[in-house]
Image (cartoon, rainbow, N blue to C red):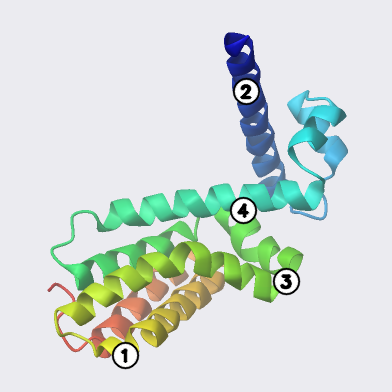
């Protein structure tokens, strides 16, 4: 019996991941409004009952896709900052990586274009804060611990950085020249951090 239960759990997890992969591709290609549950069922080959076992509807499926993308973005920004020589350099590397990631058509369509309108600005912002803000706050707190920032400014400064990189990412996502504007965006966030942080970015 335990083996059968484990097999059922594994099959359920595999079905969920398959649905997420198919939905991600469709949402990225067609956008949220033009992607139907029927299209997901047709592309995935999964039964309607199985889909609704994992997701209550299209909104829930979209939110699960968002969660997966946010997790991946977090992993990529952490990896980009892994070799940094200090918290300020790590913060810079992570911020610049997020601006670069904004060129990804999947990230652009789902995370930056559709998500704010589908979820509403407040819920989208809350999602961003749940994933990105914690990483930023950790780096800013470490900078403060080294004397580079007043401790009482950690919270508000973290929000300032998050707002700045999100706005630049949205700018890149909606641009007709994403490569050029990505370079301008990375230069802008580099300049913002160099001016706001009293210590050198490489420290």
Q: Is residue 82 left or right of residue 2?
A: left
Q: Element type at marker 4?
A: helix
Residue 179, above or below 38: below
Image position of 152 with respect to 125: above or below: below
**Residue 174 visible to an observer of this rendering:** no
Secondary structure type for disc 3: loop
Q: Residue 99 has which mark?
A: none
Left or right, residue 41 beside residue 84: right
Q: What is the crowding at mark 2: few (fewer than 14 residues within 10 Å), some, or many (at least 20)?
A: few
Q: Are marks 2 and 3 in contact (CB under 8 Å)?
A: no
Which residue bears the numbered disc 3? 120
Q: Of the residues under marks 2 and 1, which one precedes in the sequence?
A: 2
Residue to which mark 2 is pinned: 9
Q: Earlier in the sequence, mark 1 or mark 4?
A: 4
Distance CA(mark 3)–CA(mark 1) = 30 Å
Front disc: 2 or 3? 2
Say if residue 191 shows up in the picture.
Answer: yes
- The x, y position of residue 22, in whole percent, is 68, 35
Give the mark toward the camera: 3 or 1.
1
In the rendered image, which quarter is residue 83 located in?
A: bottom left
User: Residue at 70% of width from left, 40% of height from top?
Assistant: 23
| Left or right: 172, with 120 as reference point | left
Of residue 86 and residue 175, the one placed in the foreground of this image is: 86
Discs 1/4, front: 1
- Pinpoint residue 137: horizontal percent, then vertical percent: 36, 73
Q: Where residue 191 sits: x, y (%)?
A: 30, 83
In the picture of the structure, the residue carrying the numbered disc 4 is 66
Residue 31, position as x, y percentages in the image: 74, 53
Q: Are marks 4 and 2 in contact (CB under 8 Å)?
A: no
Q: Which residue is mark 1?
A: 152
Count of all numbered marks drawn on residues in the image: 4
Q: Distance of mark 1 from mark 4, alpha carbons? A: 32 Å
């Amino acid at each position: 019996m335990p083996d059968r239960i484990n097999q059922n759990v594994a099959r359920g997890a595999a079905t969920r991941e398959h649905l997420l992969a198919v939905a991600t591709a469709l949402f990225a290609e067609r956008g949220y409004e033009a992607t139907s549950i029927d299209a997901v069922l047709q592309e995935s080959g999964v039964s309607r009952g199985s889909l609704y076992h994992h997701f209550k509807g299209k909104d829930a499926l979209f939110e699960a896709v968002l969660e997966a993308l946010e997790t991946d973005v977090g992993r990529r920004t952490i990896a980009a900052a892994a070799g940094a020589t200090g918290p300020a350099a790590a913060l810079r590397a992570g911020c610049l990586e997020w601006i670069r990631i904004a060129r990804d058509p999947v990230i652009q369509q789902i995370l930056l274009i559709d998500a704010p309108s589908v979820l509403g600005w407040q819920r989208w912002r809350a999602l961003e804060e749940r994933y990105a803000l914690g990483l930023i706050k950790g780096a800013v707190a470490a900078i403060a611990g080294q004397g580079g920032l007043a401790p009482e400014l950690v919270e508000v400064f973290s929000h300032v950085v998050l707002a700045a990189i999100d706005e630049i990412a949205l700018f890149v996502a909606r641009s007709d020249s994403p490569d050029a504007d990505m370079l301008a965006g990375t230069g802008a966030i580099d300049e913002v951090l160099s001016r706001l942080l009293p210590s050198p970015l490489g420290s």
